[in-house]
Image (tube, rainbow, N blue to C red):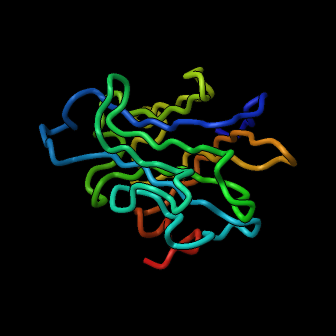
Amino acid sequence: MNADAPSTVGSVTFGIGWDGVAAGGRPDLDLDLSAYALDGAGRIVSDAHFVFFNNAMSPERAIVHVGLPSAQFQETIAVHTGQLPPAVQRVVVGVTAYNGEGNFGRFSGGHVAVSDANGGPLARYDLYLHMAGALAVAYGEVYRDGAVWRFRALGDRFDSLGAMAAAYGVNV
């Protein structure tokens, strides 16, 4: 999970999905997406630029969280790079186990994927296979490269949503 996507990206959509109910028949177990609009130093531009289930949109509406299931995903985050303010140099998207309960291995078929504005795939990662013991991971980012935006996979692990948010300077 360290290669850059070979082409530039405009708007991108990150999606998370899994097969049915989490292992153990616990419908309350859930995976969530979060996004962090960061400056050149890797710090959150403002707490309002931390987008997740309790803050579904960045101030300029460039990052939008949709928590309703679709045909492909249980939830998505769309990043509209053309609407991001100049202070934002990268947007990191993370995946966490809701309330820190259950690790990614409990979600059969658990995966995160990113697609371009036309729905073309840029990357997919099977969380339940490759990060079964993880509770939170910064999956990937879109970042400025001069005048263009690119995607890069990350794979950085954290202990929780709070730990990931704090690492990027969010006041939690």
65 lies left or right of 79: left
Give the position of the N terminus as an image quadrant.
top right
The x, y position of residue 135, in whole percent, is 39, 54
**Residue farthest toward the right in the current orientation of the protein:** 146
Given the current orientation, which residue lies at the most extreme bottom position?
171
Question: Is residue 19 shown above or below 97?
Answer: above
Q: Pick the residue in front: 32 or 108.
A: 32
* Residue in the image at 60% along x and 45% along y: 140
The reply, left or right, for residue 46 in relation to residue 20 is right
Is 36 above or below relative to 24? below
Up-down relation of residue 8 to residue 55 (above or below): above
Looking at the rendered image, the quarter that the C terminus falls into is bottom left
Q: Residue placed at 14% from the left, 39% from the top? A: 24
Residue in the foreground of this view, choosing between 42 and 82:
82
> Residue 164: x and y, percent?
50, 64
Residue 151: image quadrant is top right
Residue 87 spot, x, y in % from top left: 73, 65
What residue is at 65 percent from the left and 63 percent from the top?
38
Q: Measured along the vertical axis of the image, is residue 13 above or below residue 50?
A: above
- Residue plotted at (39% across, 61% down): 55
Q: In the image, 107: left or right of 137?
A: left
Q: Nearer the viewer, residue 55 or 152?
A: 55
Number of residue marks:
0
